[in-house]
Image (tube, helix red, strand yellow):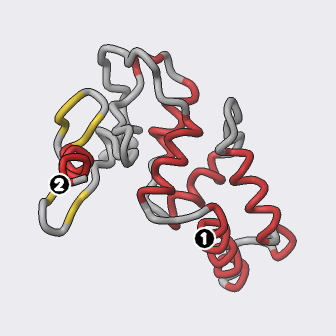
Amino acid sequence: MLHRHTFAQTPRKRFLPRIPDAQPLAPEAYLRLRREAAGLTIRDLAARLTELRAALVEAGELPAGMLAIRGDIVATLLMLEATGVRARLRETLESIAAVMPFDPDVYQQLADADPRRHPRVCRGCGCSTHDGCHHEHFGSCAWVSPIQCSHCAAREAQA
């Protein structure tokens, strides 16, 4: 007897319905917040992406002709953080996520979805409902307001 199994594909992160923010966060602001929370400048992030591309070429997973020079990556990152500019390729977002804490799904929700379907994102560090921040002494963050996580609130209170 032959058994046929149907396995469901892993679902993508679902939109979480919520009351939209009065000033919705733009995807370029999310990218900037995550980069700054990681303690990286645009040049630092470009250096990490250059190293990633070099490693992929060396492993034979990326054609050598696709290796961009650091200056091109810096220009691309500057453009991605400019107002109104959106990443066209999912691979760009996934490359960024490979070298720093960043969620491509959150970026795409902010870029493509109605503001009522945006995930909750902290305006201090850019952590979200899907990728909360973690502190070695305080543990995982929680929401203290619709736009601020507990770690950013604690940091703000100490300042």
- In depth, the one of 139 and 113 nearer the eye is 139
Looking at the image, tell me whether mark 2 or mark 1 is earlier in sequence order: 1
| Residue at the outermost front position | 159
Q: Within the image, what quadrant is residue 124 found in?
A: top left
The percent coordinates of residue 56 (x first, y second) are 66, 76
Q: Is residue 64 visible?
A: yes
**Above or below, comparing residue 155 to residue 69 in the picture:** above
User: Which amino acid, mark 1?
Assistant: Asp
**Above or below, comparing residue 114 to residue 152 in the picture:** above
**Above or below, comparing residue 82 to residue 35 in the picture:** above
The percent coordinates of residue 93 (x first, y second) are 59, 50
User: Which amino acid, mark 2?
Assistant: Ser
Query: Would you call the spot at circle 1 few (<14 residues within 10 Å), some (14-19), or many (20 or more)?
Result: few
Which residue was labeled with disc 1? 44
| Disc 2 element | strand
Q: Within the image, what quadrant is residue 71 found in?
A: bottom right
| Residue at the outermost right position | 65
Determine contact: label 2, label 1, CB under 8 Å. no
Numbered disc total: 2
Task: Tell me the number on the disc at residue 140.
Answer: 2
| Disc 1 element | helix
Q: Residue at x 87, y 71 (%)?
A: 65
Q: Residue at x 65, y 78 (%)?
A: 51
The percent coordinates of residue 134 (x first, y second) are 23, 59
- In depth, the one of 104 and 48 nearer the eye is 48
